Amino acid sequence: MPVELRDFGHATNGRKVQAIRLASDGMTATILTRGAVLQDVRLAGIAHSLTLGADLLEPYEGPMGYFGAIVGPVANRIAGASAAIGSRTCHFPANEGPTLLHSGTRGLHARHWAIDAVTDDAVTLRIVLEDDDDGFPGRRDIRAMFRVEGTALHLTLSATTDALTLMNLANHSYWNLDGTPTTAGHRLRIAADRYLPVTPALIPTGEHRAVSGAFDLRQGRTLDLTEGYDHNFILSDRPRALTEVAELTGRSGISLRLATTEPGLQVYGGQGLATAPWPGHRGEPCGAFAGIAMEPQRWPDAPHHPAFPTILLSPGETYRQETRWSFSA
């Protein structure tokens, strides 16, 4: 089916934002050129969106900044907003106390991406970050390709650099499969027998802890909105072939199965969500636990933990990450 493009408004910097609608015989997905945001996901025959988002641009420049966006060039947290990259110590603009979160306020989620290629079932967005942009070395060429196939949505992220740098991209969609105010009653399964405990500042301690209690999701667990997840679940010790790692099922019976090449899955329960006064797809603001984020990525704060999978990217290498979301009703 042909791709549809439409104007989605103008950002406060005057840049025009476009919405790209991909459609298959089983689903539609809409992506914005601002932040490479996955703005809307709908199954055929289902009236509500399965992901949190808004029909206006303004909230994406405010409290919905991360909703559906590609975050990076380094997703998640870097303690002290600094890291050693080769022989250099690089400093970044802290935006969560002394911590760097999702590469700061000028991360990829807040940038304008160009449409690089369009086919009947896919769109590729591209952005180039210049050397020393917000402290990160290297001229980095980053691409995000979204493709629909039946009732599955595929995302391929890739990047190259001309100098040693850090790269750890992630899609930051929030999922609510029932179109309800919260994810209460959703059942979550994750194929992980370990996770990373964190400090009060949400920085990994370095321990690999065996899952137990609310963190043991291997057989699936119904969310009761008391877990307060903001943790990396260990899927493997290094990137690998595309592997199904998680399943989220709503009370409605709609299911999402997630496959990834990444060794970690950051799960955030959405306890801090508050988008008022801006409404989401439901016509009302999103509040606490309105959606759950499941972000395939390498492990957070990796530069300070040599035993973690590396997020270094060298000239001549290509960073590549694949994600597949498969839906059923």
Image (cartoon, rainbow, N blue to C red):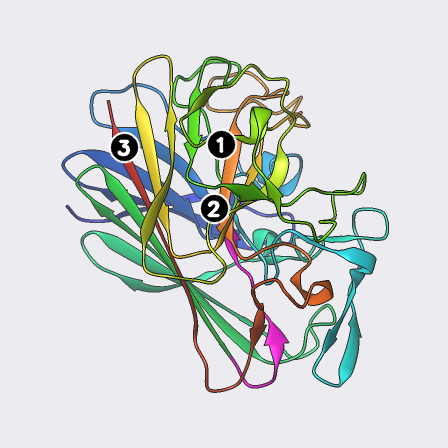
Q: Which of 239 and 112 is in front in this view?
A: 239
User: Of the residues shown, which amino acid type is indicated by label 1?
Assistant: Gly
Q: Is residue 140 left or right of residue 23?
A: right
Q: Is 233 rendered above or below residue 188? A: below
Q: Is 158 rendered above or below residue 156? A: below
Give residue 231's position: percent from left, percent from top.
Answer: 62, 40
Q: Can you identify the residue that label 3 sits on? A: 327
Callout 2: 10 Å neighbours few (<14), some, many (20+)? many
Q: In which quarter of the image is residue 302?
A: bottom right
- Which portion, as a residue range, is magenta? 161-170
Q: Do the residues labelled 1 and 2 touch (CB within 8 Å)?
A: yes
Callout 3: 10 Å neighbours few (<14), some, many (20+)? many
Q: Are marks 3 and 2 in contact (CB under 8 Å)?
A: no
Give residue 217's position: percent from left, percent from top.
Answer: 47, 30
Q: Distance between the residues labelled 1 and 2?
A: 9 Å
Give the main secondary structure of the magenta stretch: loop
User: Of the residues shown, which amino acid type is indicated by label 3?
Assistant: Phe
Res 65 visible: no
Residue mark closest to the camera, 3 vs 2:
3
